[in-house]
Image: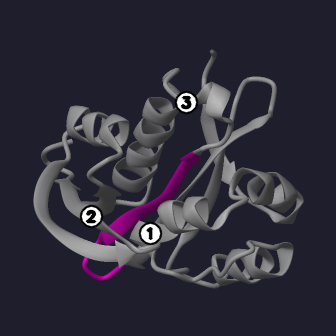
Amino acid sequence: MGEIRLVDFDETDCAQLTRWVNDEGERLFWQWGGGAVFRFPLDDAQLYAHIQSARAKNPVRRVLKAVDDAGQMVGYLELNRIDYENRAALVSRVLVGRLTNRGKGFGHQMASALLDLAFAEMDIQTLALEVFDFNQGALRLYEKLGFTRDSQHQFRVLGEMWTSIRMSLNRRQW
């Protein structure tokens, strides 16, 4: 598999992301923890605006892609709601792109790289995230990385009740 690195997501990556997030359920699932800023269908215009908001001075989000050794984008993720004063942020919109890449360790490498970025480079003290209870692979991954469950809430999504679990990790635990 090789080493995964995180780099800034930019306009040239939009077409790939829209291919990965190509139905309403996937869009809701993908954007849940970071807030509903995108509407269906996901398109370049929405992504361009989102990217621009991450380029401001002291941005409230870092929009990132995970690339493999060959420079191919294998995933997408964000640090969102960055609070510089309180040194806190939200991990959101984590997506291993192709279904054939899921379950092969890409998510672990992506999340580990994001923790390094947040805690070591940005001096964030507390990270939080939300994950649906049926996403057992993600729950196991986040717990393996040290995140603990804080609370859970139910929401009606596409006519069904989905349970969202809030998790957090502080720098000392990392």
Mark 2 or mark 1, which has the lower sequence index? Answer: 1
Task: Kindly indicate the quadrant of the structure image that contains residue 101.
Answer: top right
Q: Is residue 89 above or below residue 100?
A: below
The CA distance from mark 3 to mark 2 is 21 Å
For label 3, the residue is 102
Task: Kindly indicate the quadrant of the structure image that contains residue 90.
Answer: bottom left
The CA distance from mark 1 to mark 3 is 19 Å
Looking at the image, do the residues carrying marks 2 and 1 touch, with CB atoms under 8 Å apart? yes
Name the amino acid type tagged 2.
Ser
For label 2, the residue is 164
Name the amino acid type tagged 1.
Trp
Mark 3 or mark 2, which has the lower sequence index? Answer: 3
Q: Give the range drawn in magenta.
A: 84-95
Q: In this view, does 171 lie above or below 53?
A: above
The residue depicted at 21 percent of the width and 51 percent of the height is 171
Q: Is residue 128 left or right of residue 26?
A: left
In the picture, the quarter occupied by the N terminus is top right
Name the amino acid type tagged 3.
Arg
Instruction: Residue 27: give x, y in percent of width and height.
Output: 60, 65
Answer yes or no: is residue 11 visible.
yes
User: Which dot marks residue 32?
Assistant: 1
The residue depicted at 69 percent of the width and 77 percent of the height is 40
